[in-house]
Amino acid sequence: MEVTKLKTERPASESKPETDTSPKLTAVNATAESTATASTVAVVSLRLVNQSSVGAPQVVIVQGNAQGSSVIAWRVIEHLSPGWSHPFTYPLQTQVSVTDPWGNVSPALTVEPGQQVNVVMGTYGTELVLSSPPDSAPNVIGVVNDLSQGAIAVEVLKDGLAVARTSALYPQSHVVYELKPTISIGVASACTQGEPVGSASASEINTEISLKGIASADIVMSGGGGEGSSAQPFIFSLANVVMA
């Protein structure tokens, strides 16, 4: 958005200059520009719809193909009754947050695919420096610990929630995350949002859904019910898809 600066002309007969209000006008315009920029961030609007005959204690969603990290429960949706729905969004933007060796947590930094975050010691403390290495793969995000001492922890975020995590990245080492616009969904138990998913639960989160090119869609959950050998699996499928 182009910011238009207002110009106020002073009559020649005035002996004292008027108070310059341009900083206030500029601040207002800058805020409007920031709001407009934020409103154009691409997100996929989704709705989980329970069309099964039973409720599911936990529906767990993880980031698909989150290479470079253990499986993290991005969203855990609980107690969704038949006929009910649960809206949520999947931002195409990715953010990175770092905890330094002294326990200080950085603000979330927006990182585009192909970019790298270098964690360095600045004038006042730890800083994050964003770069675009020429040899970086276009679909990955990298983090490098350039501190002289101390391990850092890295969290990769979507919608402010962790989708990938590295607990200890030591000095002069790096990690690479490949995050495709894909989620995996399933019915699992004993999962906590933002925490690693156990191997047994991860095997149940096995329906992969590509969100590439989608603006909005319903994720319909059907099936379920029965006990023992007659138990029916839950099935997840897309409906009411609107392309971007």
Image: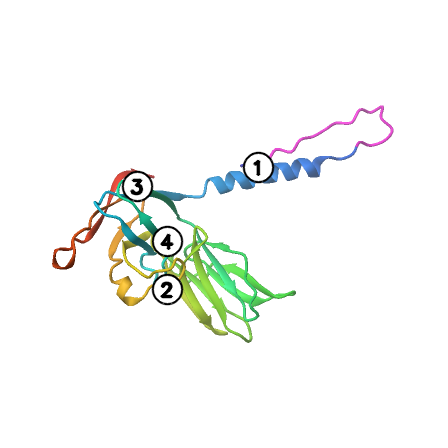
Mark in front: 4 vs 3: 3
From where the camera sits, is residue 214 visible? no
Kind of residue indicated by mark 2: Pro
Residue position marked by numbered label 3 in the rendering: 84
Rounded to the nearest whole Å, what is the CA distance between mark 2 and mark 1?
39 Å
Disc 2 residue crowd, few under 14, some 14–19, many 20+, Cα 10 Å = many
N-terminal of the pair, mark 4 or mark 1, is: 1
The residue furthest left is 229
Q: CA distance from mark 4 to mark 1?
A: 32 Å
Q: Is residue 4 left or right of residue 198?
A: right
Q: Secondary structure at mark 1?
A: helix
Whole-percent x and y of residue 205? 27, 58
Between the residue at mark 3 and the residue at mark 1, the CA separation in whole angstroms equals 37 Å
The CA span between labels 4 and 3 is 17 Å
Q: Main secondary structure of the magenta part?
A: loop
Q: Is residue 170 above or below residue 112?
A: below
Q: Which mark is residue 75?
A: 4
